[in-house]
Image: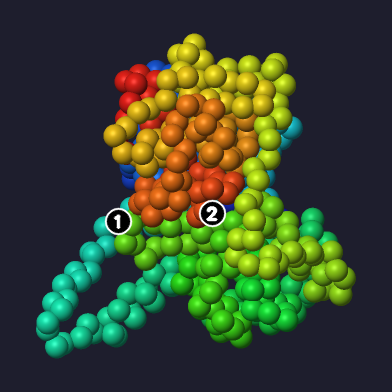
Amino acid sequence: MKENKLEILKDLFVDESHTLEDLKKLREKTKDFFKIEQKTGNVLISHEYNFTVKEKIILFMIGKYFCEEVGFEKENITSRLLSEVLHIQQTSLTAPLGELVSQHILSKEDTTYAIKYYQIEKQLDLLNEKHILKAKLPHTKVRAIVKNKKSKPNKSKVISRKQSFNETQTQLLSEEEILEIIKNENIELNDLYSIFNIRNNKLILLKGFKSQNNRESHIKSSLLTLVAHKIFYGSERISSANLRTILQDSGVRGLINLSTTLKEYSYWIVHERGQIGSINTSYRITHEGYRKGLDLLRDIINNTSTFQLKLSNSRITSREVAPPFKISQDNLNKKISEFSRIEKIDENELKMKFDFQEDHIRIIEPLIENTRKIMQIKNLLLLGYLIRKIYEQDKFNCIDLLKNSGVNSDRLDLLDSNKFYKKYFSVKKSKTAMSLIHPGEVKAKEYLTKYLTEGTFEL
């Protein structure tokens, strides 16, 4: 009887052999993303693709899983090991590792992590869809529009292009995955669906965002939408066009000023721009923004007032002040050594070029350029990057940084119109507290290496 029952139910039971039977197919899905050194078992992730931190973790885990299958000794993969091999600060790995465990992609035992074998093919399919298949899609040729020509561009084609971008494939998480995310937040699924509605994979806000003025409504509705997007789809990013569509369909008014309002709250919601001229822009909710959005969500559910929002009387009423540096000398030395090791740069060379103090940092030999704006941007890129990585502080006062380094700080208002400034720095006015955005951090890392080895670099 037991054998007969097992025969009937056998399709419901899976074991590791199901994945191993298909190694050849998995190899084809994997080969573009990483290679494995035959002698050492080191996983070499390709630099050809712009992988996220979570994707790098997943690829490394898959590589180590394959290593075990061919006879390499099992390795205890900790966040410290991942930090060393992926060259990512350990503190930056905590959140993505936690998300991967909560999404049942990784398993965790004590301090070690491993990928669940039944997730391997699914994750490889997602990576191929994102990085390989989309790259192979034919690009639409856009005809040039001659000014004197009477014919107008075909509006239907323009709309279809925008729609194809808005409808970027987002897969709704399973109910079990959603429950796993919200169970630690004391939020019930029924309460969640009383605020959000999802029909035909389309998210709609039902309540909680209406306020006395449009600005407050924009902030609340955007926070709620991004929180919902992370809970229902497992993604902290949403395209700018998709966000506007959701808010418009939900009844949010005055959206012409949405981006201007959200710029004031970049510590909650970050506007991430693509290349110059690209329509592929998006909004990303920060960790602080996610917590604030959850506070707002609970307020709506429980009819409480935990969420607090301060609106300025004008767009910039006063100069925002960057917090002062606070770090002990021992901790500073430790951070410099750790940063040098992770970035694989010469620590002594770093200390020869930069003066690190407990309350400030300066370039000993600043970069000198014929153009004042370029000179200011180059020096601020290097200093801003070191402030983020070593002092673990995002915002800084550019006037103080330039003056301490002996760099001309006149006419900083001219920076606001510079294309490099707009690409690499936050959209706050240059004379206020400012910070690097993601493209700026990536470039600053590259430029720092060139500066330490060659003494200069070109923007």
Out of 291 and 323, give the one closest to the viewer. 323
Q: Is residue 372 visible?
A: yes
Residue 81, image quadrant: top right
Give the side of residue 232 with respect to residue 182, left or right: left
Q: Is residue 114 visible?
A: no
Residue 206, image quadrant: bottom right
Q: Amino acid at mark 1?
A: Ala
Q: Is residue 201 above or below residue 49?
A: below
Q: Which residue is mark 1?
A: 135
For the residues bearing labels 1 and 2, Cβ distance under 8 angstroms: no
Number of the label disc, if any, that sits on residue 50: none
Out of 248 and 14, give the one closest to the viewer. 248
Question: Residue at coordinates 66% horizontally, 26% vertically from top-left?
Answer: 359
Q: Which quadrant does the N terminus fall into?
A: bottom right
Q: Residues within 10 Å of mark 2 (few under 14, many from 20)?
A: some
* x then y, percent, for residue 450: 35, 26
Q: Residue furthest bottom?
A: 150
Q: Secondary structure at mark 1?
A: helix
Q: Residues within 10 Å of mark 1 (few under 14, many from 20)?
A: few
* x then y, percent, for residue 240: 48, 68
Q: Is residue 211 above or below residue 128?
A: below
Q: Nearer the viewer, mark 1 or mark 2?
A: 2
Question: Residue at coordinates 87% horizontally, 70% vertically from top-left?
Answer: 304
* x then y, percent, for residue 135: 30, 56
Q: Which residue is mark 2?
A: 428
Q: Residue furthest top?
A: 348
* x then y, percent, for residue 323: 68, 40
Could you give the CA–CA distance between mark 1 and mark 2, rounded to whole angstroms? 34 Å
Question: Residue at coordinates 50% horizontally, 33% vertically from top-left?
Answer: 402
Q: Which quadrant does the C terminus fall into?
A: top left
